[in-house]
Every structure is written in C-alpha cells, then in structure tokens.
Image (cartoon, helix red, strand yellow):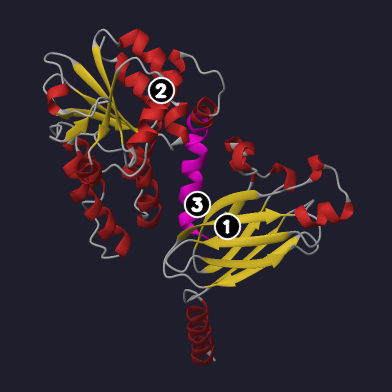
Amino acid sequence: MKKRYLSFLLLASAISACDMKPMDHFVLRGTIPGAMDSTEIELAIPGENKERLKGFIVNERFEFRGKLEQPTLCELRLNNQDICDRKNIKEENKIIYADINFFVENGKLTFTTPHVDSLPHSFWKYDIRKEKNYTLTGSPAQDIYYAYQQQTIPTRHLLRTFRFQENKQPEDAKRIVAAQTELARQTREFIAGHSNLAVNLMLVEELKKEPFTYDQGYLDELEQLFASYRDTCPRLKNFRQYLKEASAFAQGKPLQEGKVITSKGDTLSLLAQLKAGQYTLIDFWASWCGPCRASFPHLREMYKLHGEKVNFISVSLDKEEKEWQKAMGEEKLPWSQFLATRALSKEVGKYYNLKSIPTFLFIDPDGKIIFSGHSSDELEAELAKTH
C-alpha cells in the first residue's frame, strides 16, 4: 500500500513538474472598469518587426496572445474616438489615447486598474502620478520596473512640469538641470541595486547624454554597471558598442578647423573666431529651421546677460546663401554671423555627432568643447556656470 501511495506521489510530482515548465508564449488578460464596449485596444511591441496586437474591449475585458524572446517594455493603447464621434459623446468623456507602459514576458499575465479614468493619458495630458493606478502581475521584470516607476514619480513629475511650463524664468533652467541630475542619480542607483538585465538595459537608455555633456569617467561608470553580465544578447552588445563610440564625443575634444563665409563673401577660419581667454558659444542653425529661429529670443536674452564674457557665434548650415542673407536681415542678431562652407556642413556631423539643429556648442577658453545640446534652457544653465 505504501509503495502504491509513494508511486502515486512520484507520478503526481512528475505531472506537476511538467505543468511548471515555463510557457513559450504569453497570455495577457486585462480588466478595465468603465471602458466602453468596442473601445479599440492595441499592444505595441517594439523591436525590428514593431509588432502591434489589436483588439477591442468587451464587457470591460480584453485579451492578447503572443510570443517574446525576452522581457520587453510594451505600450498598451486605448482609443474610443470613433465610438464617441458616432454617439456624439462629449469631449471630456473621450479617451483619444491612454498609453500604459509595462514589461511583457512569456507567461500568464493579468492587467488591472480601478477605472479607465484613473489611467494616464498620452501627449500633453500625460500625468506621471497616475502610473501607480495600474498593475500587471505575472511578469518579474514588470515587478522591478514598477518599483522604479513608483520610486521616481516625484522627480519625473517635477521634470515634466518644468519642461511644459510656459513663461519660463531664468531660475527654471537651473531647476530643470537639477531635476535631470537627480533622476540620473536615482536611475544609476536603481540599476546598481537590481540584476534584471532587460529592465536595466531599458533604464540605462535614460542615462545616455548629448555629446560633450559627459566625460570619460561618466562612460566608465555606465560600463561598470554592466561589468558582471556575461550575457551575449544583442541589446547588451549594442550598449557596449555605444560606450565605445560615445568616447569620441566626451568633453574636452578640441574644436576642429573649418571654413566659414562672412556676409560680405569672405572665407575665414572658424578657429580664428575664438577669442583668447574667453568662452565661446557656437549656434548651428538654418533659415528653414523653425525651432532654430524660435530659440533666438531666448538667445538674445542670454547675450544681454553673458555677451561681455562669452563670445557668441552663429553658423548657418543653409545650402543657399541668399536664404541665409534674407534670414539674417529678418532676425538682425547682434553677434557674429557666418555661413558654413559646403565642406564644413558635411563635416560637422562627423566632428560633433550633430544630427539635428539647433545645436549649441560651448567652447572653453582652451578651445575644448564642454557642452552640446539643442535646448536653450539647458544652454542657459551652462552659461550661468561661467560666472
């Protein structure tokens, strides 16, 4: 009798062990109280194929099935625009989009939220503080990411508030930089304290900085965060390759020589425009670039404050000289204006990793680059350090 009982237990254990095998796919089921029937719902999965699973909410529920090679940060999107338009529902009851980010991995996953109105909406309506109003169970990676979200909500909310604030004051630029610094500190400490590679590789993207806003020591710190991993996944390889390439754009790289053209048609050396013992600001722009020209009022304010100690230079990347001349006449900027030669226009991308404009380069008195960015707010905080 005992032998039969023991055999039964072994058989039951074997069956149980088979049932415990990891699933090779995921089943995501969710409940969203208050969501209208037929609301469109989509699970956006990033990657080479950028897969999108689409469906509809029925009786406040939805379900998705799929397969992933590794835990992946996905985005759940809701859209009831069509329903509201057909039924003439008031604007305040529309959910144009509700974007929810969480890690999905193979297994049985369950999404819950108290009510559809508690979810964060997208774009300018996105409220970071609502990230605490939904949970996804069944994903160990999401458990860790949720902890990060909750820990950093105050800092991220403050940073977003500053970024979308109208009528910014000079002190706000300093507050933005301080919030960015604090968020970077929290993120580095979180990565160091957790060992989930998928989550850490996603979070470290937030620690990548613009060219010339970091030194080699900063890159070494990022490398050390992943020194213990022996994984050969593509994302880790790509990150390590990024660190190697980023070294070429660390602070301290000398400004390279190039030729620029004056408004009178003379060709001059760019390096010759630097002034001994002075910091220099170089603004790369173009007449057709709306954000470039929108930054000029702020640059004028900075010129009034720092123009005596900082050498201001604007270099246009316009292809047509007449367009540059026309824009100069309209803007009437009070500092030195130049047009980049064709050769320099081609080389700035390689020299300074310049991929968009406006781009501001800040040069120290020794001719070395100590800052690069696209935001005039961040530039203002950098200029303030010179006093």
Question: Is residue 150 on the magenta stretch?
Answer: yes
Tally of numbered tags? 3
Report the Cα–Cα distance between label 2 and label 1.
Answer: 61 Å
| Labels 2, 3: front one | 2
Q: Does the magenta portion include 308?
A: no
Q: Amino acid at mark 3?
A: Asp
Magenta highlight range = 137-156
Tag 1, which secondary structure?
Answer: strand
Residue 60: x and y in percent read: 77, 59
Crowding around mark 3 (Cα neighbors within 10 Å: few <14, some 14 to 19, many 20+) is: some
Label drawn at residue 329? 2
From mark 2 to mark 3, how far is it between C-alphas?
A: 57 Å
Q: Which mark is residue 137?
A: 1
Tag of residue 143? 3
Q: Quadrant of the C terminus?
A: top left
For the residue marked with disc 1, what is the amino acid? Thr
Residue 31: image quadrant is bottom right
* Coordinates of residue 42 in the picture (x, y in percent): 63, 61
Q: Residues within 10 Å of mark 1 (few under 14, many from 20)?
A: some
Residue closer to the observer: 318 or 139: 318
* 212 vs 34: above or below: above
The rendered magenta stretch, by its main secondary structure, is classed as helix
| Residue 10 percent across, percent down from the top left | 48, 85
First reached walking from the N terminus: tag 3 or tag 1 = 1
Element type at mark 2: helix
Point 42% across, 67% down: residue = 48
User: Would residue 116 be found to the left or right of residue 196 on screen?
Assistant: right
